[in-house]
Image: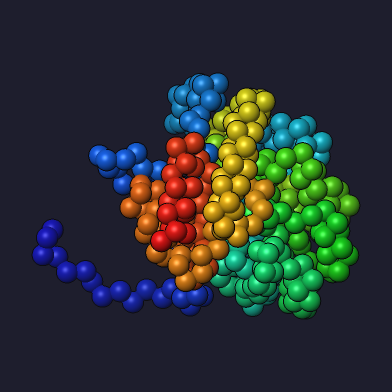
């Protein structure tokens, strides 16, 4: 086994793969004896599963010799009622990143164009490149917000898909309803606009119905949601799109068969049932976010507003040094070299530590 050399590999792979950036997952925090370490690099929910959710998952585990319900009927029905949309307009997938891949498959031929803001969610360039489509990245404004005028101006005959991440990962600000209204008026009706609301629940009441309202008004709008963040089910991989029936039906065709496990389906339903309990956790994270942002601004950091469960430190050239300083203090943040660090609002102690590290770094 040990001295076996690998055979020469002549397998022909798609050339488009050369342009696919690798996804860099947040690395786990290494255990240390001197301090409790925290991973605040993946925007995970720091709370453990609710007992009621854990219980249905444990029960569901007893049937793991069976395939799940491929139509995801129970969850689809439950979502349709909760959102007041037809069940035909819902398409589920293995996390909203799974649904994002399906969205690429149903809209883009090789060479077609996908417009999104940049910097935004790291998965966008990956799924775009995998589809062989061309990414058209429109820089954020100086306030780290979407430049929707520039995005509208970037539309061409080849544009098939536009991704709007609100609130924007990794910078935090949300796109307002009036801005989206004005933007949609400029988008041709044959171009699909996806509003990625992964962090919707952290935005408070005003943010709530924006994307769904737009979907009701526009046949070319789809809403993308996930159970990974506010609902705390990142490890179970379940997300969904709300889109008009022809789009949703195409998404269902492109889904990985039996991709959403029974565990994930049951956990998502139980989480919707337990939303009041989850909302309390979301509210405390939102309160913590305000506390963290206020403290960082007090220290002089130009932190943009955040409607999500993370804050953005625009560090520019100091990004990597800051990430190192945080690491030494037992905090794993998400650095984007030359731009800034995204830091998840997490356990109170982790948030306190972030404020401390940022203060010390500023005073260095
Ligand atoms: C975390 C995140 C998602 C959710 O990903 P899942 O695949 O559902 O875990 C989607 N969009 C954005 C912008 C995110 O930050």
Residue, x 59% and y 41% (percent of image)?
291
Q: On screen, 203 above or below 325? A: above
Q: Quadrant of the C terminus?
A: bottom left
Residue, x 14% and y 65% (percent of image)?
4
Q: Position of residue 106 (x, y in %)?
A: 68, 61
Q: Position of residue 185 (x, y in %)?
A: 88, 65
Q: Residue 89's quadrant in the figure?
A: top right
Left/right placement of residue 181 relative to residue 273 reads: right
- Identity of the residue furthest to the front in this view: 363
- From the viewer's side, name the closer residue of 218 and 139: 139
- From the viewer's side, name the closer residue of 1 and 224: 224
Q: Residue 109's quadrant in the figure?
A: bottom right
- From the viewer's side, name the closer residue of 154 and 308: 308
Q: Position of residue 170 (x, y in %)?
A: 58, 57
Residue, x 78% and y 50% (percent of image)?
211
| Residue 20 visible in the shown view | no
- From the viewer's side, name the closer residue of 123 and 36: 36
Q: On screen, 63 above or below 342? A: above
Residue, x 79% and y 76% (percent of image)?
153
Q: Position of residue 61 (x, y in %)?
A: 46, 27
- Identity of the residue furthest to the left in this view: 3
């Amino acid at each position: 086994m040990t001295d076996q050399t690998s055979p020469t590999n002549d397998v022909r792979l798609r050339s488009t793969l050369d342009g696919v950036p690798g996804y860099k997952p947040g690395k786990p925090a290494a255990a240390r004896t001197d301090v409790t370490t925290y991973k605040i690099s993946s925007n995970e929910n720091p709370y453990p599963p609710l007992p009621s959710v854990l219980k249905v998952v444990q029960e569901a585990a007893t049937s793991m010799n069976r395939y799940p319900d491929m139509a995801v009927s129970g969850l689809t029905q439950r979502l349709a009622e909760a959102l007041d949309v037809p069940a035909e307009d819902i398409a589920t997938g293995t996390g909203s990143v799974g649904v994002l891949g399906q969205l690429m498959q149903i809209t883009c031929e090789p060479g077609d164009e996908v417009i999104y803001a940049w910097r935004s969610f790291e998965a966008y360039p990956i799924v775009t490149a995998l589809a062989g489509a061309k990414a058209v990245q429109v820089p954020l404004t100086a306030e780290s917000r979407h430049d929707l005028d520039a995005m509208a101006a970037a539309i061409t005959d080849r544009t098939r898909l536009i991704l709007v991440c609100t609130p924007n990962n990794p910078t935090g600000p949300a796109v307002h309803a009036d801005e989206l209204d004005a933007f949609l008026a400029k988008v041709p009706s044959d171009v699909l606009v996806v509003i990625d609301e992964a962090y919707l629940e952290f935005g408070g009441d005003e943010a709530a119905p924006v994307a769904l309202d737009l979907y009701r008004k526009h046949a070319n709008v789809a809403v993308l949601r996930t159970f990974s963040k506010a609902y705390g089910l990142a490890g179970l991989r379940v997300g969904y799109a709300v889109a008009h029936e022809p789009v949703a039906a195409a998404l269902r065709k492109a889904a990985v068969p039996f991709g959403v496990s029974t565990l994930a389906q049951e956990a998502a339903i139980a989480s919707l049932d337990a939303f009041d309990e989850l909302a309390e956790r979301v509210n405390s994270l939102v309160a913590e976010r305000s506390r963290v942002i206020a403290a960082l601004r007090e220290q002089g950091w130009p932190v943009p507003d955040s409607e999500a469960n993370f804050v953005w430190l625009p560090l520019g050239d100091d990004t990597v040094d800051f990430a190192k300083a945080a690491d030494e203090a037992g905090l794993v943040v998400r650095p984007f070299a030359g731009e800034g660090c995204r830091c998840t609002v997490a356990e109170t102690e982790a948030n306190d530590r972030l404020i401390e590290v940022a203060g010390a770094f500023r005073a260095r």
